[in-house]
Amino acid sequence: MQQISKKVILVGNFGVGKTSLVRRFVHQTFSDEYLTTLGVRIDKKVVNLANITVNMILWDVAGEVSQTKVPASYYLGSHGVIYVFDLQRPSSFENITSDIDFIRSKLPNAPICVIGNKKDLLSDAELNSIQQNLSVKASYFTSAKTGENVEAMFEMIAKQMTE
Amino acid sequence: MSTKKRTFLQQFKSQFSPSGFQFVLLDNQGVIVESCNSLFNLNLYQGLSAFTFIPFLESIEETLVQITTKDAPIYFPRLDIPFFSHSKIYDFTFQRFEPFPEHSFIAWIIRDNTTHYYYLRQIQQERNMVIVQNERSTAGR
């Protein structure tokens, strides 16, 4: 089976759960304790798709209020982007349109997956309300705590990067 | 030692202050050609492609092999990665080093900035937690 390496960066505001999503996906663990990421952490997971094996190298980038503050070098050579926001914190998605536009300018050909995390903390009604008011369509609502939609989300971006 | 007798890496390294730095030369396949081993010993890995066993390098292979001598060095600050069993925070810089036209290397400069960054992380942690708690308490009113 063909094997390829793909670099994926996780970006978004601080405290939205980027590191927790990576830990859930790569190590199947979760902790409620918040530990800030400084700069970037790198992790790797092999994802087997139908006809191809993808070595996903995940760059868990320190959260910033605006993505323009992320060092430009972090974007270099990225094949995919996961933009994470916290469904409970409106401030984490108020700049979503400008952030996505900025990322698109840096990586015009990379798929961008928009993720609302911490789904477990919201009711269905609250989730619907947020969904309707979002300026950008979210690809998934996830919970790093329960693991809901985490595997599916990473698999989706793996597929998009190989298309 | 005269310049003539110096290895390529020694020539390159002499341009910098060596404290807290490690200098490595890779060929375009990522093979470790030479390392000064100031921070960690890469002797066991000499002759192997670093692109195959260091995920960070694997993820930016396409970028690294395309660096030319005309390009500005590429700087990756604050890399919090377990690296050869060392859990530290490094800054990496990459640039093309071409002592002769037939000898072209990817020069990899590793700087250990752990002490400085641990301090910054502590400040960032406290700042972020206060902001998040304030947002949550405002939203809960």
Image (spheres, rainbow, N blue to C red):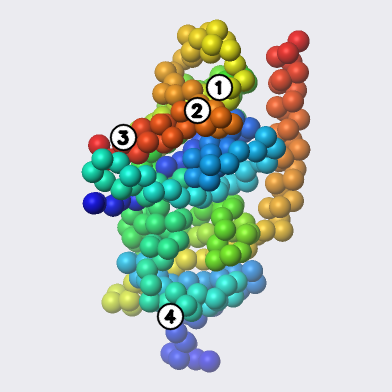
| Same chain check for tags 2 and 4 | no
Disc number placed over residue A160 in the picture, else none: 3
Quarter of the image where one finds residue B58: bottom left
Spatial CA distance of label 2 from label 4 is 53 Å
Q: Which residue is mark 1?
A: A119
For the C terminus of chain B, the image quarter is top right
| Same chain check for tags 4 and 3 | no
A74 over A121 or under it: above or below? below
Q: Which residue is mark 2?
A: A148
**Residue A99 point in image, percent of width and height:** 48, 27
Between B30 and A66, which is closer to the camera in this rendering? B30
Q: In terms of secondary structure, where does tag 2 sit? A: loop
A97 over B18 or under it: above or below? above
Q: In terms of secondary structure, where does tag 1 sit? A: helix
Q: Which residue is mark 4?
A: B8
Query: For the residues carrying marks 2 and 3, which lies nearer the camera in this image?
Result: 2
Neighbor class of circle 1 (other Cα within 10 Å; few <14, some 14-19, many 20+) is many
Chain name for mark 2? A
Q: Amino acid at mark 2?
A: Glu
Chain name for mark 3? A
Labels 1 & 3 near each other (Cβ < 8 A)? no
| Same chain check for tags 2 and 1 | yes
